[in-house]
């Protein structure tokens, strides 16, 4: 609706800018032409011509030798007087002819200007299409290279994660064979038990890697419903804190906020859980304080959920790609860098957005959620 109003306003403006100069030109041209003709056909000129005719008559009588010359001049004056005896007819003819030539010239100029404008616009359009086409080609190249780079990073990471448990398994099996050949049955039996335990641990780690990739690739379908955000946060925070004993969460909920938001309760619980887990893992061995705040502005379609903690700030290099898969500042063996990627995917699937910034108090995530009243009114 707003775009249509802008288009109408632009069209009206262009019409006004085109028509007004033409109207002004016609008005001033008519006025100047009329004034010029009135000056040319002044009664004073007619009086002067009559006086000239009378003087020529007198001269003809007084100077008979040059009578023929005076008669010729008299005839010329009479011819001019005939014109001035009917000034309105002559003025109309002159005015009509001048106007015809004027408007023909104006139409010709406007036509040439239009053709020139069309020619220039076509040139600009062709140039624009060429540039746009080149940009699309370059964008496809960049997109392809970025995609290949992402796959290379993924392959590199997978190779590293799989190699880590396979290396000790290979060493353990080789050592087990040597032990079988050189040690007594009892010593070999003890080493076999230890090897079995260690191999099982490494295999469990491999299974964990596979499960995490499976979890990331198969997030369930979003099922949105209208939820009172304050009641929902109070309900889910306590079970989450039972999982992360190194976290303290303070809910800063404005009692005046009563809006509902559209979200999937089960999936969004994972968002809050992952954000708290991320803060706890970024500050190992410390008690981390979290603050959860809800902000709502009148006239805004979204409600903002702020989740911050008082832990260490995140480096600028990590911030740029922190929501990308397999990006993390933590170096623990079990960390795959998928937590924040899953968070963003869930939030975006629910029609919201998520942003991050380092504040003076610590890292802060801003999550925009669609207000239920606005979303339901659109349906």
Image (tube, grey):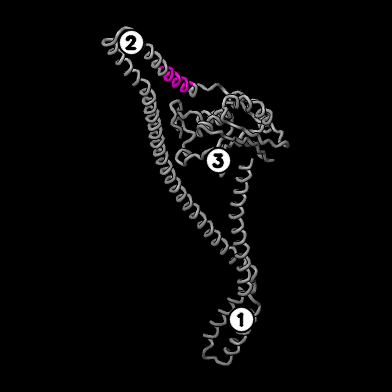
Above/below status of 305 relative to 334:
below
In the picture of the structure, the residue carrying the numbered disc 3 is 362
Q: Is residue 209 magenta?
A: yes
The count of marks equals 3
User: Seen in the image, is 127 located left or right of residue 295?
Assistant: left
State the SS at label 3: loop
Report the magenta residues as a range: 203-214
Residue 63 circle label: none
Residue at 60% from the left image edge and 86% from the top image edge: 57
Above/below status of 66 relative to 211:
below
Cα gap from disc 3 to disc 2, whole angstroms: 54 Å
- Quadrant in the picture for the N terminus: top right
State the SS at label 1: helix
The one of 330 and 87 positioned closer to us in this rendering: 330
Q: Position of residue 50 (x, y in %)?
A: 63, 82
In the picture of the structure, the residue carrying the numbered disc 1 is 49
Residue at 59% from the left image edge and 59% from the top image edge: 21
Cα gap from disc 1 to disc 3, whole angstroms: 101 Å
Question: Which is nearer the N-term, disc 3 or disc 2?
Answer: 2
Question: Which is nearer the N-term, disc 2 or disc 1?
Answer: 1
Q: Quadrant of residue 202?
A: top left
The one of 148 and 21 positioned closer to us in this rendering: 148
């Amino acid at each position: 609706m707003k775009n249509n109003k802008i288009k109408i306003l632009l069209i009206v403006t262009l019409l006004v800018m085109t028509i007004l100069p033409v109207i002004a030109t016609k008005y001033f041209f008519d006025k100047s032409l009329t004034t010029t003709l009135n000056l040319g056909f002044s009664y004073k000129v007619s009086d002067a011509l009559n006086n000239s005719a009378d003087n020529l008559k007198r001269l003809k009588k007084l100077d008979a030798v040059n009578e023929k010359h005076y008669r010729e001049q008299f005839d010329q004056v009479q011819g001019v007087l005939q014109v001035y005896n009917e000034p309105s007819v002559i003025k109309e003819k002159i005015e009509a002819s001048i106007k015809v030539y004027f408007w023909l010239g104006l139409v010709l100029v406007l036509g040439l200007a239009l053709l020139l404008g069309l020619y220039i616009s076509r040139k600009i359009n062709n140039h624009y299409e060429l540039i746009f086409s080149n940009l699309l080609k370059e964008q496809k190249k960049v997109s392809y290279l970025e995609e290949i780079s992402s796959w290379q990073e993924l392959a590199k990471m997978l190779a590293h994660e799989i190699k880590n448990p396979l290396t000790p398994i290979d060493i353990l099996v080789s050592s087990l064979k040597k032990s079988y050949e050189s040690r007594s049955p009892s010593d070999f039996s003890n080493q076999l038990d230890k090897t079995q335990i260690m191999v099982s641990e490494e295999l469990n780690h491999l299974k964990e890697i596979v499960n995490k990739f499976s979890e990331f690739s198969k997030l369930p379908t979003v099922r949105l419903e209208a939820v009172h955000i304050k009641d929902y946060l109070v309900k889910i925070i306590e079970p989450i804190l039972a999982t992360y004993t190194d976290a303290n969460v303070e809910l800063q909920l404005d009692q005046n906020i009563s809006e509902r938001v559209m979200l999937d309760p089960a999936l969004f619980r994972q968002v809050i859980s992952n954000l708290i887990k991320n803060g706890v893992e970024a500050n190992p061995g410390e008690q981390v304080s979290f603050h959860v705040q809800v902000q709502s502005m009148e006239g805004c379609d979204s409600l903002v959920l702020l989740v911050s903690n008082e832990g260490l700030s995140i480096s600028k290099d990590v911030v740029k790609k922190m929501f990308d898969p397999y990006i993390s500042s933590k170096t623990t063996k079990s960390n795959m860098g998928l937590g924040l990627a899953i968070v963003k995917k869930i939030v975006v699937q629910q029609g919201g957005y998520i942003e991050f910034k380092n504040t003076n108090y610590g890292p802060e995530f801003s999550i925009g959620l669609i207000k239920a009243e606005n979303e339901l009114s659109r349906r």
